[in-house]
Amino acid sequence: MIAEVIVDVAAYPIDRPFDYTIPALFQGFIEPGMRVKVPFGPRKVVGYVIDVKETSGLDETKLKPVEQLIDFEPVLSPELLELSEWLAEDTLAYRIEALQVMLPAAMRAKYEKFIVIIRPEAVTDEAFLSMLNGRERVPLKAADTPGLLKLLKAYTTDGAVRVETLVKQQTAVKKVRMIHMQDKRTIETMLAGLNKQAAKQRDLLEWMLTHAGESMEAGRLMKEAGMSATVLKAVIDKGAATERKTEVYREPETVHMKNSSAPAELTANQGEAVRQVTDAFHEERDSVFLLHGITGSGKTEVYLRSIEEVLKNGREAIVLVPEISLTPQMTSRFKERFGDQVAVMHSALSAGEKYDEWRKIHRKEVKVVVGARSAVFAPFENLGILILDEEHESTYKQEDNPRYHARDVAIWRAAYNRCPVILGSATPALESYARASKGVYELLELPTRVKEQALPSVTVVDMRNELKDGNRSMFSVPLAEAIRARLAKHEQIVLFLNKRGFSSFVLCRDCGTTIQCPNCDISLTYHRATENLKCHYCGHEEQVPHSCPECESEHIRFFGTGTQKAEEEVARLFPEARVLRMDVDTTRQKGSHARLLQKFGEGQADILLGTQMIAKGLDFPNITLVGVLAADTTLHLADFRAAEKTFQLLTQVSGRAGRHDLEGEVFIQTYTPEHYAIELAKAQLYEPFYDMEMRTRKQFGYPPFYYIVNIQFSHENLLKVVEYAEKAARFLTEHLGPDSVLIGPTASAISRVNNRYRYQCLIKYKKEPKLTETLQALIRHYRTGWIKDGLLLSVDKSPVVIY
Ligand code: ADP
Ligand code: ZN
Ligand code: ZN
């Protein structure tokens, strides 16, 4: 028998399956979807079996055998294997990248390099011998000085030592020590025969007598019995109890939040939405529903009811939620409804915890997964529905190979499983709404809030007037007054700022110099907590200078506003307020996000101040005021989606106020109050915004009227990057049809990152039959030649951010 294997080597021309013979030992064991260890050239690598067949078309005596089995049952289903093929082609990635993205990181193979001594007598150098320290095999890392590396090179050329790569596969399964106590009679016999001096052991045996026949985790037993490990061991040695390692799941820290239980009756609109979705489910139609409902209109309830119906029929459900709204509040709604049939997957989990959640799905112990982007690959084999909440979110797009969009993957899996998809949002992506308008998706509308609460009243404050009136604070007079009023009434306030750090940059007031990253074409960001400057692109850090590096002036100041600065302003203006700050800096620690939210939910603070991450999901009854400190920050991004993003963000943020019985109020501070994104977000008018924005997109030839492909080039040498970008542009112009437009090559918006110069080409097209073929040919040029010259090239067929 022959196994077709995709090997873990991402390089052209290896992107195809290789045939390996299956040794007699593994015959009948190896199935598609299992991982194996195979020889590849001089190396041993992990491979994914994608097919098992009787014969190879090749000379079978020349084939190498599969060396080892890594899995004893397939980790990838036939569906996921097929999906990987489509994914690799659609995103122009290597097949191996498409396979790996489907499995939790803990299952990814690790390769470690070792120095192995072949002829000990030939290794005589003192320094090298002292590094070896008597060992015959040492990690390559041990030879980390230029001197040692030089010796290593000489010895390997000479054949005295060899560098070997070992595949390491951590099992990542967590095990605990379980103690099983014997029956009463056995323990009593032991007590009777116990030495008088062994008082501690006697105490433990007496305790065990009351737990005879039970099993308990060792740590807990010692704590409850008040005994040390030594005493426990003595008693086990005597035979009063046995111990055994047992596999367990890690239990991620969960914060419990109270949610209203299932409402007795759906509203008419909700009922209609659920009916259409469940009809599609029963008729095995792979319909895509766009559930357009304003915040608080009861979309989540529609998801829950649809899933209920799917589970009742023995099928499974995937619910995707953007990372930042994957709050305990969100997930506990699913857990309350479906109990321990729910697995949760988000990036705050450790690699081990993610692996455990994955195993629960793989072993069919759960039926619902609620998770961020990668949960779309959950290994269910009987899917009945896929749901994307906040479907417009850009985090559904992966910005690494394979550059997939979770929406596309969900739609693919729905087609494979003949089940429906729900895309839910208060502010659907323009692409999605356009598809719904054309009837490609089915539109479901929830136009009113469930409890008929009025939408919060929204005031737009023109900050130019504030400045004219001499107010230089980041708080306008009306917003400051509103905050004071809420503080007096003990109601809660959310303040939203679309930036992180203390201020965006450091500026010299005499010569106008800003402190730039030495590696990237971008200003450094000041961080108060560490008192230094950081580059958010390459990670470069440096001390804040005391004087301007250009003119030596000491008038060098932090400029702009960030959450830290805002926190100080709040403290100055409202000294009595208790403030919680929530941004990337305060939520770096595991679980801190949930803890901050819980604190706010319990009323331990009056003001929650934060970035994007507070815009979503927050649902606390006591929030009656939302302030957006600077609405313009997203509006001026060099991005054709700037207006759409601003509209989405403002709508989301406004939705946080007055969700329950208390009336809500929203203030939006801006320097451009007349912009349609701001005016229409104020009234939460999605359709007029859609019409307006579609007109602009049409005029400038942007999606959804045209598709865009972004091709990014980078090189350490500016002349080289220009040379290759031009070469690629010529190639594209020659091969693409006359209706496609090529823009560029031009320097990217951020023209240098990490000391690499960046150029880009955009392809705009409506219909381009030769697109995939041409891009593949371009990538082939790159992988077989240009890459060796230090060029990096990436192709993104559905870019969501272009920088
Ligand atoms: P969305 O997801 O659209 O923001 P939710 O599903 O969170 O809306 O609903 C908003 C609030 O209304 C929640 O507290 C929810 O429990 C409640 N709710 C939803 N549907 C109903 C209903 N049919 N009757 C009463 N309350 C409901
Ligand atoms: Zn200066
Ligand atoms: Zn940098």
Image: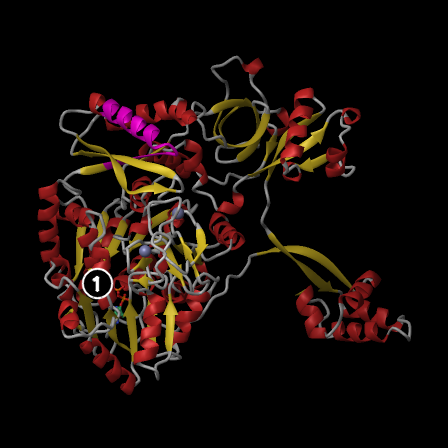
Colour scheme in use: secondary structure
Q: Is residue 222 left or right of residue 319?
A: right
Q: Please check the rendered image and state whether residue 508 is part of the magenta-colored stretch, yes or no.
A: no
Kindly give the residue lying farthest to the front in the view shown.
Answer: 552
Location of mark 1 (residue):
631
Q: Position of residue 467 (x, y in %)?
A: 17, 70
Label tally: 1
Q: Position of residue 283 (x, y in %)?
A: 25, 47
Which element is circle 1 on? loop
User: Taking the image as drawn, is residue 136 in sight?
Assistant: no
Q: Please check the rendered image and state whether residue 716 is part of the magenta-colored stretch, yes or no.
A: yes
Q: Position of residue 90 (x, y in %)?
A: 31, 34
Question: What's the amino acid at mark 1?
Answer: Ala
Q: Is residue 661 above or below residue 296?
A: below
Q: Residue at x 26, y 26 (%)?
A: 726
Q: Is residue 693 left or right of residue 540?
A: left
Q: Is residue 345 above or below residue 448?
A: above
User: Taking the image as drawn, is residue 235 in sight?
Assistant: yes
The part of the image, by quadrant, that contains residue 795 is: top left
The stretch of residues the image draws in magenta is 709-732
